[in-house]
Image: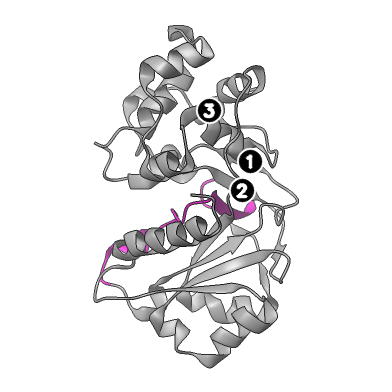
Amino acid sequence: MSRLNDFLKKNNIAVSSELPIVHTTQGFNLQSIMGSSELAPTPCNIFEGEDLNYFFYGKPSYKSAGDFGQSKQWEMPICFLLSPSAISNIKRIYPFDSGAFLSGRHPDYIRKMGISDFEAAPSPDTPRRIIGAFFDSIDDFFRLKPKDEDKFKTEFSLSLLDAQVLALRELAGDTSLATIDDRRFAVEIQSDQKLTLNASSVEAVVISDSYFSIEEVRNYITDILQAEIIMYSTYSLAAADHTALIYDKVCQYLSHKDVL
């Protein structure tokens, strides 16, 4: 049992509001996704020998290595906002981007502890417990404004013997970590099962204006998935530079749903 899981299990935590689960991919994958109407696990270069699907809870945080250079329209992000019940088989949950952690991009004060300290129970309510423990609100989670350190220690009776938990709270508010941005504290969910895309599993799809102009895409989302289309504008920038626009659109969607 990990240090994080011990903390979540033993404390009375007010869980956060329920958020959609987000899967982000590049636009050129859309044609094959539309053909199969599923998200299939792919070989993982972090957990070698495993085929995995990756999701983030509530946040469109995923970025691929190629997202930081000048991008073509087909490299723009597409985000599927999924029902929390859509994933029936959870493999692992972490409170951060596991790839960034295992690649050594996190600060030494937490990296030296080892990723096994931070694997949480693969339960559907775990993401809500993580957010409820470290943040006062969903808005604070999106803005990465963790609970005040003294308040946090008092609320959960923490001491230096709880270094892993204290390090996580520190990580959430560490604005010096530009290279891992919002992924430093974004609840990652892994699954080794395919996920069928249909009216029950998909709530909304975030797409660029270039894809919105394609009738086939619009019809697939509105008629087949019966999901809401959330469009963002694209500019002559890297794909990763559009993250703030996508965040804003997702936050507007959550506000409309009375979650934010």
- Label pair 2/1, CB-CB below 8 angstroms: yes
Q: Residue furthest bottom?
A: 215
- Judging depth in this view, the residue of 253 and 114 nearest the camera is 253
Q: Residue at x 53, y 92 (%)?
A: 215
Labels 3 and 2: the sequence-earlier one: 3
Q: CA distance from mark 2 to mark 1?
A: 5 Å
**Mark 3 = which residue?**
133
**Mark 1 = which residue?**
92
As displayed, is residue 63 above or below residue 223?
Answer: above
Q: Residue at x 71, y 61 (%)?
A: 194
Q: Residue at x 70, y 53 (%)?
A: 87
Q: Secondary structure at mark 2?
A: strand
The boundaries of the magenta stretch are 44-70
**Quadrant containing the N terminus in the rendered view:** top right
Q: Secondary structure at mark 3?
A: helix
**Mark 2 = which residue?**
190
- Judging depth in this view, the residue of 132 and 191 nearest the camera is 132
Labels 2 and 1: the sequence-earlier one: 1
Colour pattern of the rendering: one colour
Q: Amino acid at mark 3?
A: Ala
Residue 131 vs residue 239: left or right? right
- Mark 3 or 2: the one toward you: 3
